[in-house]
Image (cartoon, helix red, strand yellow):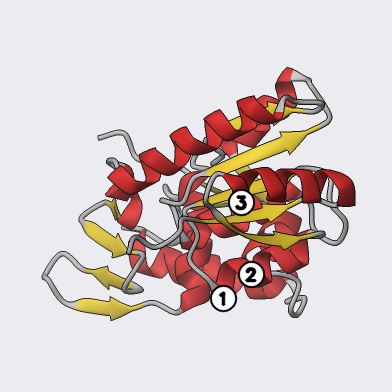
C-alpha cells in the first residue's frame, strides 16, 4: 500500500486550520497541525513531510523564521505560505526565505488543494533541488549533510552542526548582510542566547578555514552594528 503523503500545516486561526485540514484529509493526505511557529518546528524535527504550509503571522515564531530554519536543514521539502498581506514585498521576502508557493487570504480551498497537489507531485520527483547539499568556496568544498569540509589536498575537516547551519544561512543569503538577530533565531533557535562574541568566533573560524589571508577577508565580513555577510568570489 502506498504511504499517505504527509503535510505539516501551521495556522493559528482555529476554524481555518480545521477547514484546511479536513479538505486535505479528504484528498488523502495525512495532516499534522500546529497553531504556532514553535510547535511547527518541533513537528518538523520529529517527522518527514512532503509539504509544509505556513501561515506567516503566527504566535511564538512567525512563518518566515520557521521557513528559514527549516531551509537550513532541508532544502528539498516544498514550503507554501498563507498570508493575509498581499504586498509584493511580502511575496518577495517569502520567496527569498525559500518558499515554493504563496497564497493570500482569503483564498479558495479548491485553489489551495490544486497548488498542494502540484507541490507534492514536484517534491516526489525530487527535482534538481539537491544541488545545495554542497558548496565550493575557493578550492574547498562544504558538505552540508555530512558536516564536512574537504580541503584542497583532499583532507577533511569536521564541522559542527552549528558551524554548518551558520555557513548555510550566510551562503543562502550571499551578498546580503544577515543580522545577528536572524542568526540567533535561525541557527540558535532561541535555545540559548550566545553573545555577539560567540558569532564573531564562528566567523573567525570560517576565516581560518577559507580566507587566503584571514586578516583581509574576501568571503566572510563583519558589518559593524548590523551583522555578517558572505560574499562570493567571482573568479
Give the structural element (helix, strand or loop) at label 3.
helix
Q: Nearer the viewer, residue 145 or 7?
A: 7
Label 3 crowding class (10 Å Cα cut-off): few <14, some 14-19, many 20+? some
State which quadrant residue 148 falls in.
bottom left
Q: Are marks 2 and 1 in contact (CB under 8 Å)?
A: yes
Q: Nearer the viewer, residue 48 or 152?
A: 48
Location of residue 196 in the rendering, given as x and y in whole percent from the top left corner: 73, 69
Give the structural element (helix, strand or loop) at label 2.
helix
Asked if 119 appears above or below 38 in the picture, the reply is above
Asked if 103 appears above or below 233 in the picture, the reply is above
Q: Earlier in the sequence, mark 3 or mark 2?
A: 3
Residue assigned mark 3: 25
The residue depicted at 46 percent of the width and 49 percent of the height is: 171
Asked if 22 appears above or below 81 in the picture, the reply is below
The residue depicted at 52 percent of the width and 36 percent of the height is: 100
Q: Are marks 3 and 2 in contact (CB under 8 Å)?
A: no
C-alpha gap between disc 3 and disc 2? 18 Å
The residue depicted at 26 percent of the width and 51 percent of the height is: 138
Numbered circle sitting on residue 46: 1
Question: Which tag is nearer the camera, tag 1 or tag 3?
Answer: 3
Question: Which residue is at the far left?
Answer: 153
Residue 232 appears in view: no
Q: Nearer the viewer, residue 74 or 29?
A: 29
Q: Earlier in the sequence, mark 1 or mark 3?
A: 3
Left/right of residue 152 with respect to residue 88 in the rendered view: left
The residue depicted at 79 percent of the width and 49 percent of the height is: 17
Location of residue 165 in the rendering, given as x and y in whole percent from the top left corner: 50, 65
Location of residue 97 in the rendering, given as x and y in whole percent from the top left corner: 59, 42
Residue assigned mark 2: 43
Amino acid at each position: 500500500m502506498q504511504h499517505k503523503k504527509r503535510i505539516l500545516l501551521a495556522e493559528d486561526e482555529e476554524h481555518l486550520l480545521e477547514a484546511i485540514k479536513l479538505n486535505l484529509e479528504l484528498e488523502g493526505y495525512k495532516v499534522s497541525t500546529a497553531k504556532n511557529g514553535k510547535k511547527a518546528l518541533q513537528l518538523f524535527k520529529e517527522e518527514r513531510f512532503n509539504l509544509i504550509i505556513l501561515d506567516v503571522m503566527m504566535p511564538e515564531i512567525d512563518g518566515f523564521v520557521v521557513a528559514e530554519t527549516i531551509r537550513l536543514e532541508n532544502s528539498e521539502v516544498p514550503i507554501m505560505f498563507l498570508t493575509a498581506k498581499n504586498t509584493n514585498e511580502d511575496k518577495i521576502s517569502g520567496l527569498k526565505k525559500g518558499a515554493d508557493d504563496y497564497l493570500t487570504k482569503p483564498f479558495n480551498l479548491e485553489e489551495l488543494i490544486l497548488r498542494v497537489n502540484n507541490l507534492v507531485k514536484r517534491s516526489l520527483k525530487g527535482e534538481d533541488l539537491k544541488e545545495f547539499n554542497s558548496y565550493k568556496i575557493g578550492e574547498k568544498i562544504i558538505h552540508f549533510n555530512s558536516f564536512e569540509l574537504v580541503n584542497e589536498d583532499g583532507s577533511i575537516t569536521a564541522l559542527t552542526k552549528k558551524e554548518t547551519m551558520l555557513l548555510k544561512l550566510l551562503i543562502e543569503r550571499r551578498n546580503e548582510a544577515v543580522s545577528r538577530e536572524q542568526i540567533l533565531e535561525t541557527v540558535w533557535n532561541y535555545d540559548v542566547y550566545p553573545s555577539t562574541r560567540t558569532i564573531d568566533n564562528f566567523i573567525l573560524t570560517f576565516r581560518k578555514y577559507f580566507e587566503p589571508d584571514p586578516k583581509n577577508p574576501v568571503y566572510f565580513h563583519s558589518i559593524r552594528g548590523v551583522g555578517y555577510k558572505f560574499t562570493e568570489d567571482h573568479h
